[in-house]
Image (cartoon, helix red, strand yellow):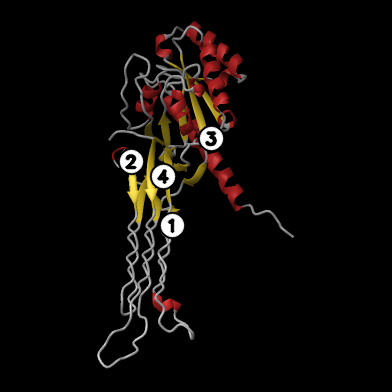
């Protein structure tokens, strides 16, 4: 299945049905009076988050969603039926943006969450509604109210516990394949990963979701390369795993470039917990490993012991790093739960 994380769509709720002008006509009933029914209400446009989707690809091929108009009223006081509503199903983590793709209108983060995007118009009144003591035979009815129409953007931000970031060809896909059952494309050239990949990592009979994101390059926050398109996926993670290519000439510079792009993008990315991994250590000598580990520690301000030595190809350090990732995620979940349960006292 192809991955698509944003799509522009047109939605329109149904117009209300018009009221009816009608009079009762039966044999031997001289003054039957008005019996025009009311029009039906137009259908609504709903958006629902479902758990079994992870892409917006369906909205590439269908961009227009229109609810049914309400049926006009009829004689014999028969009101028109309401129009059928439309429900669009989207992945969990989908944001609904305005037509300029700038303002968040709704954010669907829970399975089964539904939002009303366009309310259908109310139906019009038939002439029976307008009868009074002074006007016993009104020939008046009202049209239905129009529905709502708009262009909106759907933007998907993946729900993952941890996010893999790093320069192109840092070994992120290899690490994802080594730590989970995911099988992303792996090759020895930059930008092998062109779309986010999700993997479920199992650690000591516990699990968390890891997202492999396309490589970042300098200027990614300004739209250079692939990074700007996918930096938003990092916003929902609880911890960032920053992988550094150990075979690079200047690992400190690679680290600084990615951190700068995270800071320029905003969204609180630099405030998230960060774990640094020096990858591809199987291709380095022991002296080179220590030298580059020290350079990374100085650039990040962390203790050298906190720089994890990894090899996605051989599996070195993968399990220990996954355990540390799960520990950070577990603490973050506990803090979120405690914060949600705390209700400030209001006198």
Marks 1 and 2 sit apart, C-alpha to C-alpha, by 21 Å
* Residue 302 shows in this picture: yes
Marks 4 and 1 sit apart, C-alpha to C-alpha, by 22 Å
Q: Nearer the viewer, mark 1 or mark 2?
A: 1
Name the quarter where the C terminus is drawn.
Answer: bottom right
Q: Which mark is residue 119?
A: 1
Name the quarter where the N terminus is drawn.
Answer: top left
Are there few (<14), some (14-19), or many (20+) residues within 10 Å of tag 1? Answer: many
Are there few (<14), some (14-19), or many (20+) residues within 10 Å of tag 4? Answer: many
Q: In the image shown, does 199 or 66 lie closer to the viewer?
A: 66
Q: Which mark is residue 337?
A: none
Nearer-N-terminus badge (4/1): 4
Label 4 SS? loop
The residue indicated by pointer 2 is: 59
Residue for point 51% across, 23% down: 221
Label 2 SS? helix
Q: Quadrant of residue 305?
A: top right
Q: Left or right: 59 with respect to 223?
A: left
Are there few (<14), some (14-19), or many (20+) residues within 10 Å of tag 2? Answer: some
Q: Is residue 67 above or below residue 59?
A: below
* Residue 323 shows in this picture: no
The residue indicated by pointer 3 is: 328
Q: Left or right: 195 with respect to 330?
A: left
Nearer-N-terminus badge (4/2): 2
Q: Position of residue 18 (x, y in %)?
A: 37, 66
Q: Nearer the viewer, mark 2 or mark 3?
A: 2
The residue indicated by pointer 4 is: 92
């Amino acid at each position: 299945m192809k991955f698509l994380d944003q799509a522009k769509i047109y939605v329109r709720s149904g117009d209300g049905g018009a009221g009816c002008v009608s009079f009762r006509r039966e044999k031997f009933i001289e003054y039957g009076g008005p019996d025009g029914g009311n029009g039906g209400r137009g259908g609504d446009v709903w958006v629902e988050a479902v758990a079994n989707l992870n892409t917006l690809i369906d909205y590439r091929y269908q961009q227009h969603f229109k609810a049914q108009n309400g049926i006009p009223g009829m004689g014999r006081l028969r009101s028109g039926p309401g129009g059928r509503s439309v429900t669009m199903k989207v992945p969990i983590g989908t944001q609904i943006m305005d037509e300029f793709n700038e303002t968040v209108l709704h954010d669907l983060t829970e399975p089964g969450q539904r939002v009303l995007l366009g309310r259908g118009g109310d139906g019009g009144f038939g002439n029976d509604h307008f009868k009074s003591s002074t006007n016993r035979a009104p020939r008046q009815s009202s049209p239905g109210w129009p529905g709502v129409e708009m262009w909106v953007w759907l933007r998907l931000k993946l729900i993952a516990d941890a996010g893999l970031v790093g320069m192109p060809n840092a070994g992120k896909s290899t690490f994802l394949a080594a730590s989970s059952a995911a099988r992303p494309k792996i090759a020895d050239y930059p930008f092998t990963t062109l779309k986010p990949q999700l993997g479920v990592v199992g650690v000591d009979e516990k699990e968390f979701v890891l997202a492999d994101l396309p490589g970042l390059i300098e200027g990614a926050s300004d739209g250079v390369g692939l990074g700007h398109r996918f930096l938003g996926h990092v916003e929902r993670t609880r911890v960032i795993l920053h992988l550094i290519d150990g075979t690079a000439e200047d690992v400190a510079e690679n680290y600084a470039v990615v951190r700068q792009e995270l800071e320029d993008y905003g969204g609180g990315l630099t405030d998230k917990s960060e774990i640094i991994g020096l990858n591809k250590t199987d291709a380095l000598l022991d002296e080179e490993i220590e030298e580059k580990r020290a350079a990374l520690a100085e650039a990040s301000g962390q203790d050298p012991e906190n720089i994890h030595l990894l090899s996605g190809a051989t599996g070195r350090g993968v399990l220990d790093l996954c355990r540390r990732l799960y520990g950070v995620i577990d603490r973050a979940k506990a803090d979120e739960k405690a914060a949600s349960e705390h209700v400030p006292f209001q006198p």
